[in-house]
């Protein structure tokens, strides 16, 4: 029995955009999928769209401390304020990672504002999770430029290239050892198996991107990849547990 850790889900309450996903919703989905713990983050980018987004995540984690792990989704163009919020989130609120969605923030992964925050994340020993799919500012080759500029920071390619750029994600993960591939919302189980073969199971992370994607279906996708028992445990739990252990504390 593997204690599964889902490394990418969302909770938020932002009526202007119709984002109403309280923590109870993801907890129910985790229970259905037999997932023990999950990373949560907002849909909005703090502090530009929502000032209290980090507090919302912190309250959700406080409500379900044995189930939920907080990530800070921040807007790098807030610059010094964003860096201060990241430090506070990690050192004072026990957050464990940084999230960027380059389309949402209209900022390239390799923009200096993004790089400053990725470097700060590296100093705090937390990973930076990028939305990495088929949109024009979220491609694997673009995020690879950030990985090259920030070799001491762990960078996770969420969705590992989406539908049409998975091969590029595999190529950049082979080139840069600080890149991890995350499995959510990418529809090809055989590509997960290929990733394990090409870069090693130690840099592949399970995630669902729930509630937008169904966590139970995402777990089944990994099972269809037909990994060895050892590699399955690494992907579903052990790799991310090791990342969590290294997070800087005050």
Image (cartoon, helix red, strand yellow):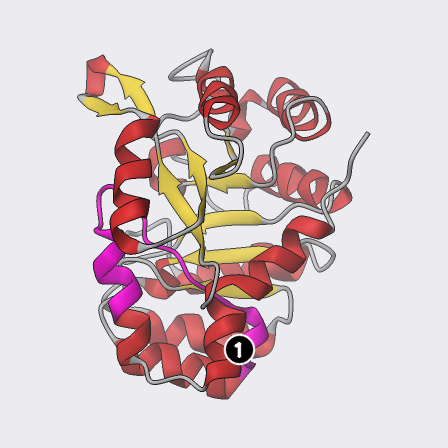
Q: Residues within 10 Å of mark 1 (few under 14, many from 20)?
A: many
Residue drawn at x 57%, y 39% as measured from the top left: 114
Q: Quadrant of the N terminus?
A: bottom left
Which residue is at 27% across, 38% downward? 28
Report if residue 77 lies within the magenta region.
Answer: no
Rendered position, 184 above or below 228: above
Left or right of residue 182: residue 113: right
Residue pushed farthest front? 1
Q: Position of residue 138 (x, y in %)?
A: 37, 52
Residue annotated with mark 1? 201
- Vertical order, 2 against 30 (above or below): below
Placement of 107 over or under 239, stated as above or below: above
- Measured as percent of width and height from the top left, residue 89 is found at 63, 25
> Can you see residue 154?
no
In the image, farthest residue toward the left: 18
- Quadrant (top left, top right, bottom left, bottom right) of the C terminus: top right
Q: Residue at 34% of width from left, 30% of height from top? A: 11
- Give the x, y percent position of residue 115: 62, 43
The correct choice, above or below, for 6 with respect to 50 in the image is below
Q: Residue at horizontal 54%, vertical 30%?
A: 76
Within the image, what quadrant is residue 25 found in?
top left
Magenta stretch, residue numbers: 199-220
């Amino acid at each position: 029995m593997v204690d599964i850790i889902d490394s990418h889900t969302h909770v938020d309450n932002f009526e202007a955009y119709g984002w109403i996903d309280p923590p109870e919703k993801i907890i129910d989905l985790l229970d259905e999928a037999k997932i023990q713990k999950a990373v949560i983050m907002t849909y909005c980018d703090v502090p530009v769209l929502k000032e209290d987004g980090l507090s919302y995540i912190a309250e959700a984690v406080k409500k379900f401390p044995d189930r939920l792990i907080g990530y800070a989704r921040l807007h790098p163009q807030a610059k010094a304020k964003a860096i201060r919020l990241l430090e506070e989130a990690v050192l004072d609120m026990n957050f464990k990672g940084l999230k960027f969605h380059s389309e949402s923030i209209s900022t390239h992964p390799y923009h200096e504002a993004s790089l400053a925050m990725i470097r700060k994340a590296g100093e705090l020993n937390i990973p930076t999770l990028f939305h990495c799919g088929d949109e024009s500012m979220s491609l694997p080759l673009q995020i690879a430029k950030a990985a090259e500029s920030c070799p001491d920071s762990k960078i996770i390619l969420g969705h590992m290239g989406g539908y049409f750029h998975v091969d590029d994600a595999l190529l950049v993960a082979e080139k840069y050892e600080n890149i991890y591939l995350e499995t959510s919302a990418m529809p090809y189980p055989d590509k997960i198996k290929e990733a394990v073969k090409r870069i090693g199971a130690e840099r592949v992370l399970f995630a669902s991107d729930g509630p937008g994607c169904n966590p139970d279906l995402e777990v089944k996708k990994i099972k269809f990849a037909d990994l060895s028992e050892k590699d399955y445990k690494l992907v579903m739990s052990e790799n991310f547990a090791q990342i969590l252990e290294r997070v800087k504390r005050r």
